[in-house]
Image (spheres, helix red, strand yellow):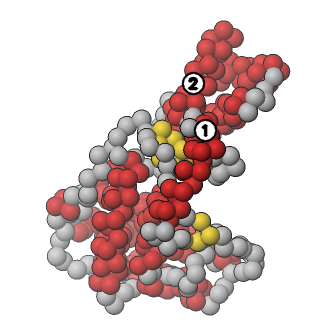
Amino acid sequence: MSKKEKDKKLSAKKNAKAQERKKLKVKLKKTKLKTDYKRVERTAMADLGAPSGFFALPMTQALMAYSQSIIDFDESGEVEDMNEAFQFTSLIWNYCIFMELGDVDEKITKKILAAIQLFCQVEQNEAQKLLDKYIIIKREKFPPDFQIQGSPMMYMRKEISHLIAPFNYNQLQLSDEVFPPGEKDKKLIVNLNKMDKHIYGGKDYSNWEDEYFSMEKAFKESFSDWLSKKGVPGKNIRNFPFLAEIFLNFVYRYMHDDIVVLKSVKAIYFEEFLFDHVLRKVMMEPHEHVDWPPMLKLLYIFLYEKEYLDDPDSFIEAINSVEPRFIEALRDRFS
């Protein structure tokens, strides 16, 4: 099958799947001027079709996946070292792209080899071996024949079939005790309501950005403390506040079709968050994505007990309705 025929078949598959779920709109970060943004129709991340044995991911995540395949990132290392490593792998990535386009010469290759020698602390002959290895990894993970020219997405080969099991709710033996707001919680809710007023009043985000980040930090601390009191396992106590931060960012720092605050999130926005925002922007191990729905449900129970909400049931029902389809989307993507 020719490249053109592959592209045509792939495009038809994507269009068919996209009809199953309403196309979602890009939510750009709020800009200094209210009118300084555009809404662009695009297919949700979970609806992007991919050739058999591949899955779609944004260019940034593709580059990160490639980086991790050629560099042993030490999580305990300095941020500056990791940034330097990422810059190095970006340089190799670009060289591979130019090679695929037939647009490299001896001068460029010498510069790349010099960069490898410097970064990897090897001699020139060893640098050439490493470059050859990096090129093969790029070709195997992201075969040029399967990519669509000009697309912001990449198709990455599935090297491992991940078992996506639903979240084990039996591990969440929550305390029935209600933990009403303490002084810190009350201050948090006051500040959270201030964020809501800014949203409803159309106040420019640049004027309350600092307030938001202060509120976000306090939110994570209160949520973590509440999870601990509720008896949530330690692993989830460490993970859920981080996930909650991403959801807060989605609600308060991105444009939506409606006015959206935590107490007004509709089912369609939970769907957009899970099926598009999470898969497009958050890098996690595939099986860890099942933590999103339980975190969201606990988040709304937390907001109820801290007296931000009158009733969390409608939000929990909306999340429950989305969760099984989200698990299926994960299986389709990673299995």
How far is disc 1 from disc 2 in space, using C-alphas? Answer: 22 Å
Q: Which residue matches tag 1?
A: 2
Q: Residue at x 30, y 79 (%)?
A: 317
Q: Quadrant of residue 35?
A: bottom right
Tag 2 or tag 1, which sits nearer the N-term?
1
Residue 112's quadrant in the figure?
A: top right
* Amino acid of disc 2: Ile
Q: Is residue 302 visible?
A: no
Instruction: Tell me the residue that label 2 is attached to.
Output: 136
Instruction: Mark 2: give few (<14), some (14-19) or many (20+) Cα within 10 Å.
Output: some
Residue 223 visible somewhere in the drawing = yes
Q: Position of residue 295 (x, y in %)?
A: 34, 66
| Residue 89, horizontal then vertical, whole percent | 63, 33
Front one among 159 and 14: 14
Q: Report the residue at 51% width, 41% height from top.
A: 156
Left or right, 206 with respect to 290, comes to right
Looking at the picture, how far across and down is residue 118, in whole percent? 69, 21
Left or right: residue 107 versus residue 251 is: right
Mark 1: secondary structure: loop
Position of the N terminus by quadrant: top right
- 188 sits left or right of 197 in the view: left
Name the foreground residue: 333 vs 35.
Answer: 333
Q: Is residue 118 above or below residue 206?
A: above
Q: Out of 1 and 282, give the one closest to the viewer.
A: 1
Percent x, y of residue 66: 55, 36
Mark sitting on residue 285: none
- Residue type, label 1: Ser
